[in-house]
Image (tube, rainbow, N blue to C red):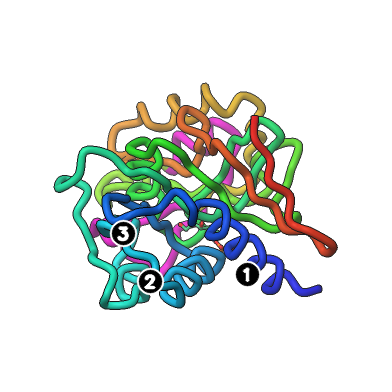
Amino acid sequence: MTQDIKKKNSAKAAFELIKPDLNKDSVLGIGTGSTTNYFIEALNESDIEIKGAVCSSISSEKNLNPSIKVIELNEVHSIDFYVDGADEFNDRFELIKGGGGALTREKILAYSSDKFLCIVDDSKHTDLLGKFPLPIEVLEIARSAISREMMKMGGKPVFRNDFITDNGNQIIDIHNLLIEVPFELEEKINNIPGVVENGIFSNRKADVIIKAKSEEVEVLEL
Ligand code: 5RP
């Protein structure tokens, strides 16, 4: 079974899981990426009526069927379910996100949600976060200064060429970081001036991991 089919299976399982709880007052949070696009596909194909969706990127907004209302986060009190993929996850449901560059908005939506469902295939599992280069969204003027700080922490910063986030900022991908205590590193990186956000999701981690394997889809809850 290909990774792509697993992504689709995970996304479909997430949709089936939350469908019975969706109604015309429901606000859905929708992330970004190829796995999330399969979730959007399932939502678009259904005839379910919801209040609307808050998206973590302009690209996800564009993929939504026009019958689904796009809502700004400022217009709602909270998000009922936030559904998004990840680049890595561990057994404590901590994540690395931001491969698609939408990490800042993703973290904001995850924080604003009652339930965060993370849709992944089994290849994303790791015991120690950091094999996937950690994305950091930065203000352009601070890019070199932040890169130097990340080198002091043992990482190898690589500037993401030709990429600007939906917030108008740049991304540095940090290779070779051993993220032994994700909670501490998330805070430490965010304390460097000029960092907008980093892709460690430990303060607000996933509530549910929906992991597709070759034979089945597992729904894991802490
Ligand atoms: C985007 C993300 C994505 O969720 C992450 O990169 C996983 O992407 P995909 O589902 O395409 O494997 O964090 O910023």
Residues under labels 2 and 1: Cα distance? 29 Å
Q: Which residue is drawn at 52% across and 27% down?
A: 185
Q: In this view, does 204 lie to the left or right of 196?
A: right
Asked if the residues shown at circle 3 and circle 1 are in contact, with their CB atoms under 8 angstroms apart, the answer is: no
Task: Answer few, some or many: residues within 10 Å of disc 3's Cα (few below 14, many 20 plus, some between 14 and 19).
Answer: some
Which residue in the rendered view is the most extreme toward the right? 215
Indicate left or right for 144 with 126 as reference.
left
Q: Residue 54, how many percent across, how many down?
A: 29, 55
Which residue position is annotated with label 1? 8
Rendered residue at 19%/54% (across/down): 72
Residue in the foreground of this view, choosing between 117 and 160: 117
Identity, as a three-letter code, of the amino acid under mark 2: Asp
Q: Which is nearer the N-term, disc 2 or disc 3?
A: 3
Depth check, mark 2 against mark 3: the one in front is 3
Q: Where is residue 129 in the image (x, y as percent from the top left)?
A: 66, 39
Q: Name the residue that disc number 3 marks.
A: 50
| CA gap, disc 3 and disc 1 | 22 Å
